[in-house]
Image (cartoon, grey):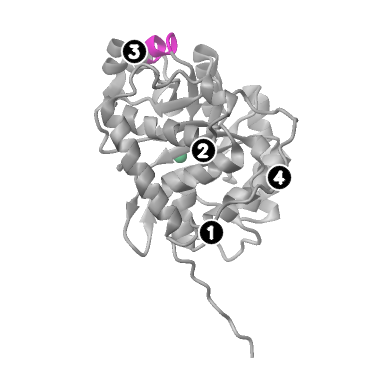
Amino acid sequence: MALYVIIYIEPSSYLQRPIKIGYPLSDKHIKEDFLGFGLGLRTDHFEHILQHQPDIDWFEILSENYLVAGGKPRYYLEAIAEQYPLVMHGVSMSIGSTDPLDMDYLKALKKLSNDIQPKWISDHICWTSIHGINSHDLLPLPYTEETVKHVAERVRIVQDILGRRILLENVSSYLSYQDSTMDEWDFLSQVAEAADCLILLDINNIYVSARNHHFDPLDYLKKIDPRRVQQFHLAGHSDFGDYVIDTHDHDVSPPVWALYKAALERFGAVSTMIERDANIPEFPALYNELLEAKNIAKLTLPDHPALARSNFGARKLNKASQQTSVVTQHAMQQKLRG
Ligand SMILES: [Fe+2]
């Protein structure tokens, strides 16, 4: 008779252990340079940014909002692009679907890329549509060798069309497939290797999925090749106790800050931004939250030369943010101690 034992990892316990560096850093440079600390560009903040010109290092745009030339969004985008580096982040590539790639979408993406010259272009390792019906959600894939091959082939086609490597982001998930034969981190690594693409690691998504599927998020970090991690996302979520939803409508939570610190230890200085898509606060609140990310990076990597190249925060390291920083550092230490 077979005996099955289910092991449940307490969410608060897995962040207590220090992460070990598993990969030697290679001198094979395939990544763009460290860009610093950025924010998602949101319409609520257009006027503030143009009026006050905050010293944010870069902005990430949602590509789909700017695919049509002309109009108000493109007016603001072009004005902001004159002053800040931009990166493009999309939600419609549906790279894992078995539907044909949407060539009209890819052409529009390339046109936008030619117009605003982003530092890089990203989308998600997921599927969103099937038989032409769009779910409007970023759905996880079955993690199999067949899917690795399927996704990698499509990524290579997209990269040929766009003329550059793209970044694929890990999604948060609430279900898994019985057909999966590998862990998500192995799947992401194998696709990145087979397609020769880069990775956008969403730290909050790792935390959300770890809580929902009861895995150790440090295992995730340990298995990803640092040479391919180009960008981090940070975001807030909604915690319902038994499960967590990736809502992007809260501040970044202490356990996600703690996981961000572990990611910095593992991957070094990686361009970092905060995503906020609902319950969007005034710009200064997001600015101060992003200062937290920079403070944690400076504490974690005090001598890293790339961090010295970031101008963000130099003009406005105000009292409020320093106080927030102390609160968050205390919360992180508590979380890491358990
Ligand atoms: Fe994200």
- Foreground mark, 1 or 2, reads 2
Looking at the image, which residue is at 44% across and 57% down? 337
Mark drawn on residue 53: 3
Which callout, 2 or 3, points at the residue further toward the start of the chain? 3
Q: Are marks 4 and 2 in contact (CB under 8 Å)?
A: no
Q: Position of residue 249 (x, y in %)?
A: 30, 42
Question: What is the CA distance from the residue labelled 1 to the residue labelled 3?
Answer: 40 Å
Q: Amino acid at mark 1?
A: Asp
Q: Is residue 80 magenta?
A: yes
Residue 11 or residue 47, whichever sits in front: 11
Q: Which mark is residue 23?
A: 4
The image position of residue 167, as x and y in percent, is 58, 33
Q: Which residue is mark 2?
A: 300
* SS under mark 4: loop
| Numbered tag placed on residue 183 in the rendering | none
Label 4 residue near ligand 1, CB within 8 Å: no
Q: Residue at x 66, y 56 (%)?
A: 144
- The residue where tag 1 is placed is 216
Crowdedness near tag 3: few (<14), some (14–19) or many (≥20) residues, C-alpha within 10 Å = few
Foreground label between 2 and 3? 2
The residues tagged by marks 1 and 2 sit, at their Cα atoms, a distance apart of: 21 Å
Q: Nearer the viewer, mark 4 or mark 2?
A: 2
Q: Callout 2, which amino acid?
A: Thr
Q: Measure the C-alpha gap from mark 4 to mark 1.
A: 18 Å
What's drawn in magenta, residue-wise? Answer: 77-83
Residue 289 in magenta? no
Separation of residues labelled 3 and 4 (CA atoms): 40 Å
Measure the alpha-carbon separation of dots 4 and 2. 19 Å
Where disc 3 sits, the SS reads loop
- Residue 137 in view here: no
